[in-house]
Image (cartoon, rainbow, N blue to C red):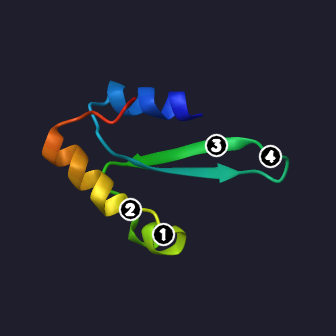
Amino acid sequence: MRGALARFLADFGLSFGAFDFAVTASGAWWFLECNPNGQWAWLEDAAGLPITHAIADLLENGASGHD
């Protein structure tokens, strides 16, 4: 999944994207959309992840983030 999402971002020239999926009761994943500036602050707070810092680094350094 990680590789597929990285390719999606690269193909669309994006450095960041908030992906939305639906998962069926049987465990099948369905792609809904990719928001190039989606909401993520709630996740940063809930999981204690440095998302703001990571995005700022990407923007400042011009890195693609697809590694």
Please provide percent x and percent y for residue 30.
64, 43
Question: Amino acid type of disc 2?
Answer: Pro
Residue appearing at x 45%, y 74% in the figure: 45
- Sequence order check: which comes first, mark 4 or mark 2? 4
Place residue 40 in its image quadrant. Answer: bottom left
Question: Label 2: which residue?
Answer: 50
Contact, mark 4 vs mark 2 (Cβ under 8 Å): no
Please provide percent x and percent y for residue 38.
36, 58
Residue 27 is labelled as 4
Question: Label 3: which residue?
Answer: 30
Question: Amino acid type of disc 3?
Answer: Trp
Question: Label 1: which residue?
Answer: 48
Left or right: 13 in relation to 17: left
Q: Residues within 10 Å of mark 1 (few under 14, many from 20)?
A: few
Q: Residues within 10 Å of mark 3 (few under 14, many from 20)?
A: few
Please provide percent x and percent y for residue 41.
39, 70
Question: Amino acid type of disc 1?
Answer: Gly
